[in-house]
Image (cartoon, rainbow, N blue to C red):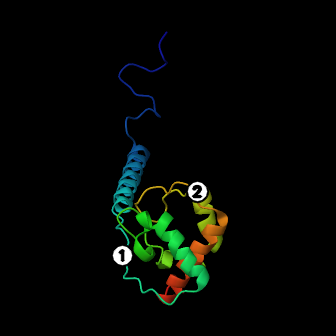
Amino acid sequence: MRSGRRRGRRAKGNRRWGRAGRKSIAVVLAGGLALAAGAVWLSRREEPPRPVVRVPELSAAAVAGRELFDRNCAQCHGENAGGSENGPPLVHRTYHPGHHADVAFELAVRRGVRAHHWRFGDMPAQPAVTPAEVSQITRYIRELQQANGVF
């Protein structure tokens, strides 16, 4: 059985690439180029600048937090939370209390964090650090942030 087409003549709706088809292809190609350009742009995000962190006179809670930070966090987040090649600086406007409240630090330590601001990779959970220790570490970070104009 034949498909109903007459020999030598195309059915009306069966044009190879009609005007609408060419427009659709152009839109798809433009969208693909836009996605590719966006992916390249996102992959080229630079690491944050490493600030020179001014250390103020610390409260007793922040001094305890500094010792805990040095033991548990500095290997990635750098001396005085100034960042390193392994992790971002925490003395940075990204970690302003209005954007990352204190509970964000506790959740990050307890659950880990998927990379979303920087290109350092995911932060694994730190089960050896207790909530009370996170509170002291957070106090230290907040005092550093305040002394360095983050808030």
Give how far across and how far down residue 108 sits, in percent: 58, 62
The disc at residue 8 is none
Q: Quadrant of residue 77?
A: bottom left
Q: Which residue does the image show at 48% across and 66% down from the upper left?
A: 71
Residue 91: image location, x then y, percent: 47, 78
Give residue 105's position: percent from left, percent from top. 59, 68
Q: Secondary structure at mark 2?
A: loop
The front one of 129 and 16 is: 129
Mark 1 to mark 2 CA distance (whole Å): 27 Å
Q: Residue at x 63, y 72 (%)?
A: 135
Q: Residue 122, can we see it?
A: yes
Q: Are marks 1 and 2 in contact (CB under 8 Å)?
A: no
Q: Secondary structure at mark 1?
A: loop
Binning the other alpha carbons within 10 Å of mark 2 as few (below 14), some (14 to 19) or many (20 upward) gives few
Q: Is 64 situated left or right of 34 in this image?
A: right
Q: Of callouts 1 and 2, which one flags the residue occurring earlier in the amino acid sequence? A: 1
Q: How many marks?
A: 2
Q: Which mark is residue 50?
A: 1
**Which-is-in-front pick, marks 1 and 2?**
2
Mark seen at residue 128: 2
- The kind of residue tagged 1 is Arg
Residue 100 visible in this rendered orientation of the protein:
no
- Residue furthest top in the image: 1
The percent position of residue 42, horizontal first and vertical second, equals 39, 61
Above or below, 52 relative to 9: below
